[in-house]
Amino acid sequence: MHASQTTMVKASDLFVRSLENEGVEVIFAVPGEENLDLLDSLRRSSIRVVLNRHEQAAGFMAATYGRLTGRAGVCLSTLGPGATNFMTAAAYAHLGAFPMIMITGQKPSRHGRQGRFQIVDIVATMKPVTKMAKAIVDAAAITSIVSDAFRVAEAERPGPIHLELPEDIAAEMVPDEPVVPRSRARLPQCPEAALDEAAAMIRAANHPLLVIGAGANRRPVFDALDDFVRTTRIPFVTTQMGKGAVGGSHDEYLGTAALSEGDYIHKAFDQADLIINAGHDVVEKPPFLMTQGGPKVIHVNFSPAEIDEVYFPQSELLGEIGATFAALTGRLRDGCRHDPAPFYQVRDEVAQKVNTGEDDDRFPMLPQRIVADVRRAVPSDGIVSLDNGMYKIWFARSYRARQPNTLLLDNALATMGAGLPQAMAAAMLYPGRRVLAVAGDGGFMMNSQEMETAVRLGLNMVVLILRDDAYGMIRWKQAAGDFPDWGLTYGNPDFVAYAQSYGATGHRVTDAASFCPMLKSAFEEGGVHLIDAPIDYSQNNRVLTQELREMQGEN
């Protein structure tokens, strides 16, 4: 061979090398024949391939990997139905701001012998629910396209990227070129003048209130937010997706805005003369509505506020949120005097209301007792992954997340079926921590086949099914709207036998006193466990409808 002769390599090998260059350690996958070259390249790589039982679950696991690490999770599917099954996971990552790369196959781009068989324009389909969707039509561009995909996915606001790799491009021989070096962008910093102005507003306030939203619940922000609260002692409220960004063990923690309006926690906003709104994200229902003459608002975020009739902040601090709060803390360290007493009255009332029933022994169990027992059984660093159902409101109101990313809650897309895959990704990332998936019977059955994946992977986790034999949240809305109770109940399998059929261990709760010991024992034993717990949702109407209506009538 002549010394100057170019070495050729398969394009799929170059693609995988580009993934390795980005630090990819695992890919969640349901491959098809259009991925076979890529799959073979992965076989010879350092990347672990986790074989899922459904593409939606693979997408949820990749998005959760991104959520927990800040690095884009990666998932793989074939063309057509495999790719369309990614759509819900893509929307979940898009609204939740979780970095993710979706790789899908496609028929040959330059020739075809099967007509339109399984052909869907996936790139066009993905565009509305991604930050970028692109088909790779030139193998020579693979390294730059992959590098750009990760950069865009992880940049604020994070989100999903879709790359389509046709099988003829994957199989093509191309010159072996070095991959594009991994670059790290420096996030913009808030201007000094804006920080000085905001610090002066905070010093002048008698009753400042910190509100923590989804955008502040990111790894680079946690320490700075915590230091801000410890230094200034400003009371704070979280949204559902901001929950846990600062630990709930702080005296300054008032509670979580689990409902749109009219809950006990919303009284805190009535006491404030200044609201510091950290990480406001319009995908969440607003925890407060601004009015003319109401408290002033400081908007702290990576991006400008979206102004409308209920949100028009008087000050905007734009830049990396953690750095912004670190700078504010420095300015306020020697002088931040305010009166938190009115907020502490709200805090104590909220605690009294949301904790009522935490020791109630009736069976089927009340949601308040279940939340309290989960908190008793799960240590501070344990992770609770919520699916979407009625219990999400109870956990949002009552569960104290003591460390960041220990309550995985989705209040953006709020899709059912995500709780189990979320927990699986967490158990893979943190094998030494207790991980609990909480799902209703409806949400669990949407991706229950992944129990086999969890057992095959040798994960340590517990799946708690709260069984009411109905779509409970919609049934609550039905009752609250004075509609007849109709059309929302169903039957269920024997969940204990179902778990055992996958090689997991099944348990059934028969009285309230046995639940917490059962949960602790399952954690201690290790492996995959499922607990079937009947739940009494009569509290939904009594507490979340009647009492709140009465409270709103008092205002």
Image: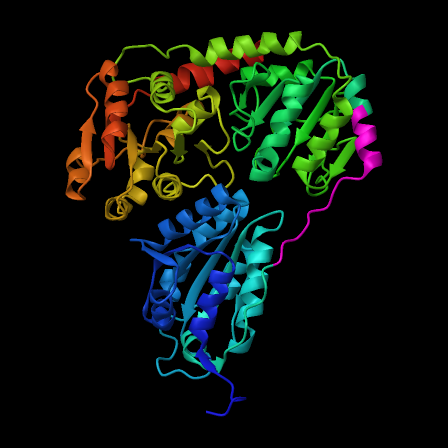
Vertical relation: 503 (above or below) 479: below
User: Residue 40, position in %: x, y?
Assistant: 34, 70
Q: Can residue 138 be seen in this view?
A: no
Q: In the image shown, does 403 or 163 lie closer to the viewer?
A: 403
Position of the N terminus by quadrant: bottom left
Q: In this view, which residue lies farthest toward the bottom?
A: 2
Decide: is 111 above or below 312.
Answer: below
Which corner quadrant of the image does residue 202 belong to? top right
Q: Residue 134's spot in the image, x, y percent?
A: 54, 66
The residue positioned farthest toward the front in the image shown: 3
Query: For residue 34, what is the image quadrant?
Result: bottom left
Tell me: 493 left or right of 333: left
- Whether residue 89 appears in magenta in the rendering, the answer is no
Please provide the residue range marked out in magenta: 183-199
The image quadrant that residue 435 belongs to is top left
The image shows residue 122, relative to residue 57, as above or below, that is: below
- Residue at image x 85%, y 35%? 193
Q: In which quarter of the image is the C terminus?
A: top right
Going 24% across and 24% down the picture, which residue do you hit? 521
Residue 193 lies within the magenta run: yes
Q: Position of residue 14 (x, y in %)?
A: 47, 72
**Residue 341: % across, % down:** 65, 7
